[in-house]
Structure formats: C-alpha cells, structure tokens
Image: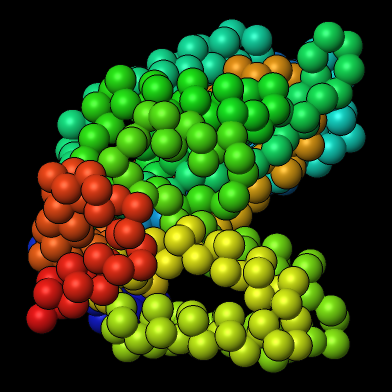
Amino acid sequence: MTAAPHDIDPQEFLHEHLAQASPDLLRELMQMFVNALLSGQADTVCGADYGTRTDERTNRRNGYRHRDLDTRVGTLDVAIPKLREGTYFPDWLLERRKRAEAALTSVVATCYPLGVSTRRMDKLVQTLGITGLSKSQVSVMAKDLDEQVAAFRTRPLDDGPYTFVAADALMMKVREGGRVVKVAVMVATGVNAEGYREVLGTHTATTESGAGWLAFFRDLVARGLSGVAMVTSDAHAGLVEAIGATLPNASWQRCRTHYAANLMSATPKSSWPWVKTLLHSVYDQPDTDAVHAQFDRAVDTLADKLPDVAEHLDNARADLLAFAAFPKSIWRQVWSNNPNERLNREIRRRTDVVGIFPGRNAIIRLVGAVLAEQHDEWAEQRRYLGVEALAAAQAVLTARTTNPAQEDTTDTDSAPAIAGELSA
C-alpha cells in the first residue's frame, strides 16, 4: 500500500511563512532552537542523550524549570533542564537578565555567605529559576552592575533646566557592625527641558538628616542641576533647609497628601470629614485667584469652630500654595509627591524580598539598577509636562530672580497675577 501524498509540502509551507516574516512563527522557531540547544548541553553534562541507557552516563534529567527570556521577536518560554544531581544553568542566559533582576540575584548571592535570611533567600533564588551560583559568576555580575550604577549615579545632569524636582526618602534595613540598623535611601526626580521625567540621583545616609540631604543636593548641583523653579517634598526640616541652601531661587511645595495627614492628626476625629472637604476644595478651584480666595474662606470657616486647626492651616499657606504661581495645566503633576509613589512601590517590590541587606553597597546596587531601568522607561514614554508650560514656569522663575523683593509674596499677591497672565 502506498502512502497517501501530503496535502501540504512542509518545505514550501516553511518558505512561505518565513517570507511573510510572521512574528509568531519566528518566535516559535527561536524558542524551539533555544530549548534544543539547552537540551543538547544538558545531555553533554549527563554524558548521554536523553532517554539513552549507557555506561557512560553520569547524571539524569529531572524535569524542567521554565523562565521567560525577552528577545527582539518577543518573550520566549525557555525550558531549562533540571538534573537529579548538581545543577545546570547556562551562563549566557543568566547574563541576559535585566539590570534590576541581575542586581537582585547578586544581592541574594552576597547574602548567602553572611547568613542573611537564608530561608527567604532560598525561596527567592528558586523563584528566579536558579539552583546555584558560583563565586566567579557573582563577582563578574556584581562588578558589571556596580560600574553601570556608578555611571548612572554620577552622570552629568546636562538636559536642564530641571524646572520641577521632587525628593523623597525610604528607610531600609542593613547589617552594619554586627547589628541591623536602618539607613535612609534618598531619591530625587526631575522634569528636564524637553518635558520628560528623569531620575536625578540616589544617595544613602545613616539617618534622614539635614546633613544627608545637604550632601545629596550639593552633589546634584555639582553634576549640573540648575533652573529649578520648585521642589516638591514632605515637610522634613532637614530637607527643606537643604533645598534653601542649594537652590535659593526655587520655591518649596509641601506635598498636599503628606500635609493632609499632618492636619488630620491635629483635627478631632469627628470633625475630620468636613475639614478634609474644605481642604480639598482649595485644590478644586479653576484659577490662581480662586485658589487663594477659597483658602481664605476655609481658614475663616475653621476659625470659629476649630481655631487650632485654622491656625495650623494658615501657617502652612505659603508652603501649600506654591504651585499656584505656575500655570494650572501642571498643577496636578507638581502639587504632591504622588507621582513618585509608583516609583517607591517599584523600589519596595524589589527590596522587600531581600529584607535585610548585607551592606550599603548592596542597597545602592539594587536600588540604582531599579532607578536606571525606570529612567530608561520614562525616556521612551510621552512627555510628562508640555514644553509651553515649562517655558511659562521658567518665566515665573525669571521674574522671581529679577525682582527678589517679590519672593516673599510670590505665593500670595504676585502669584495670581503672574500665573493669570501666563494662562491667558
């Protein structure tokens, strides 16, 4: 009996789809090739082909562990053979990890000999798909990452002026001197001349003190930070003093979210809902004049029933309303540190799995790698602020610098007129 002819010629079918450059087909072919290569290397380690019984065999297969591999044709599902004895993991696949993932791997490997959270480290390494790392692999990986992070942290800030800057700090645990202590990790972001967000830098200090913030901002200025019209942050005294000392022409915007928490602590619990409504009404106004007028009404309303709360709010007037000196189109992006919260969550997502770092270098390596990746992503996204709005904001800074006498009234009397003219 003769075999029935094929309805489709495989060779013709392959040439046809390759000619069409189908991304799905190319991805499948690449995945097959990579998995076949890994299988062949595993057979070499075992001393015999898969499923073959021979006296030369020195090891046996024990299933697969899957991990994603990002390529130009898409994400591949790579099946890495597991062995019954020892481990097999290709060096080239380890090197292709993203910077943040490679940094996390190197930190984990560094934690092992120091006895830091061994059970946590075991689970994390298994999640990354690795059952063992040699000292040479860790050394090469850490050296490469440290060079990349150092280049990122010390790069010139030559894309200014950086009209708007935001600063925040996170506390992390580290082993120092045989005990576990907390260190402050300071992060600053800014908006460059083209309207794109940038990670300006990161710095570690023993505590979130004025000295630490001053050293951080001095380094940013030395690297080229200039043209700053406003800095947004919480009300940490050392941070505010550092801003005034290094960026004398910049105004300070107290984060509205942080201030709401401060005001809530000074308000009777039963009264907070309507006090919160009054506070939010200030930010819901259509223009600068209306913002200041509503702020006055809120203070007057509170003065009768809650004089202490009214005083608390009135004392924060200049700090809370610094944003009103600039065009309304950018208020939401600059009146709080909320845009930085997403960045903080990404940092926490990577650092929480480590728990306690073996040293400050490990913190810088991991946090620096995460920030470098985020910096690259921001460069590829759409503009954070429009170029025209930035030009208008620079005009406010120029007016403030040209007429220092109006600096004390920028947030009260002069701001409405300037912002109104720019908006018009």
Image spot of residue 92 (x, y percent): 45, 27
Residue 10 visible in the current orientation: no
The quarter of the image holding the C terminus is: bottom left
Q: Is residue 327 left or right of residue 165?
A: left
The quarter of the image holding the N terminus is: bottom left
> What residue lies at 19% left-to-right and 73% top-to-bottom?
417
> What residue lies at 34% left-to-right and 35% top-to-bottom?
247
Q: Nearer the viewer, residue 298 or 21?
A: 298
Q: Nearer the viewer, residue 107 or 250?
A: 250
Residue 263: quadrant of the picture:
bottom right
Image spot of residue 76 (x, y percent): 44, 53
Image spot of residue 132 (x, y percent): 71, 24
Residue 22: quadrant of the picture:
bottom left
Q: How many marks?
A: 0
Image spot of residue 151 (x, y percent): 35, 20
> What residue lies at 78% left-to-right and 75% top-to-bottom?
267
Residue 402 visible in the current orientation: yes
